[in-house]
Amino acid sequence: MGCSSSSVSYDSTWEEDEDDSSAATETTSVCSKEVLYPPKAQETPRNLEERKSKQYQDEMPNLMFYKNQMKFRPNGLYIEDLLKNWKDQYDILEENHDYIQWLFPLRQRGRNPHATPLHEDEIEMMKNDEEVKRRLREAYKFMLGFYGLQLVDESTGKVSLAQNWQERFLNLNWHSHNNRRITRILMCLGDLGYEHYQEPLIRFFLEETLRNGNLPNVKRSVLDYFIFSVRDKNERKKLVQLAWELYEPKHQFIWGPMNTEEEICCSYCCFWL
């Protein structure tokens, strides 16, 4: 017998009725219980994992991307596929502007509306996850290759020229938006536990731009933005000192932020990447 509309208007599930011999009453009670209090489906380990995964995708998408459990958005790849299939695909890396905010997320919102800023809990989880840290190192090496560089010491962060550096320097010098990408990379390294990678890369660019005369269109960004990505004041002072030593002519050396550090990061690096 099905439950009529009148059957669900009254529920006697929790009543203690010693005289419950009426078939109609029993039917009413059972039907009402099934409609108003349907039995909960038992949550399996797989369902639990899927629910947690969905929750993390909503709340910690950067972590999930780096765990290789979601693709970067929009229309992206899993990080392992990106690092494998886009390696040396320089035209794609130059023209696609969506992946960089996923490979190197920041606390501030950027140009890609599908990318989510880092928050403190996510940062801590990523910094303490060995799988994430390994992939961040691989992402860093991946982008160094795009710029004609290579990581020669994973412990210290020392970098050097790659074999194809001349070709890649031409691209870097010609496309100024890569200066902003490098600023983003430096800031992300600082947020996610690789602060010691910042100084070697900035020192390298100071040498190339000021001593060797390469990358003239990158020089201003090195002085005004790359150095400012370093939070440690002592390290920053050392880099400014090096910049002054290498700069010629000395009397024209002017260094200093036009705005506060936060304003520089937001206006220059974050939104336009």
Image (cartoon, grey):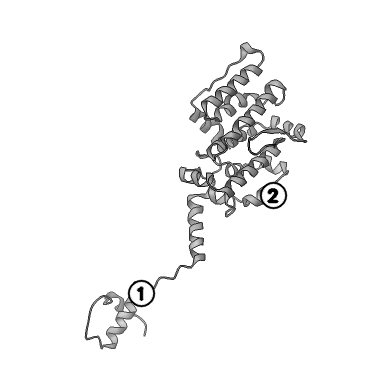
Residue occupying the point 40% across, 70% down: 40
- Does 50 sit above or below residue 266? below
Residue 4, x across and y down, in percent: 33, 80
Q: Quadrant of the C terminus?
A: top right
Which numbered disc, 2 or 1, marks the residue closer to the eye?
2
Residue depicted at 28% across the width and 76% down the height: 13
Q: Residue at x 57, y 50 (%)?
A: 65
- Image position of 22 (left or right of 95): left
How packed mark 2 is, by other alpha carbons closer than 10 Å (few <14, some 14-19, many 20 or more), is: few
- Identified by mark 2, the residue type is Lys
Which mark identifies residue 35?
A: 1
Residue 198 % position (x, y): 60, 32
Which label belongs to residue 107?
none
Above or below: residue 16 compared with residue 181:
below
| For marks 2 and 1 on the same chain, the one whose residue lies earlier in the sequence | 1
**Which residue type carries mark 1?**
Val
Residue on which disc 2 sits? 84
Q: Whole-percent x and y of residue 201?
A: 64, 31
Q: Residue at x 46, y 45 (%)?
A: 121
* Quarter where residue 207 is shown: top right
Across and down, in percent, residue 137 comes to 63, 42
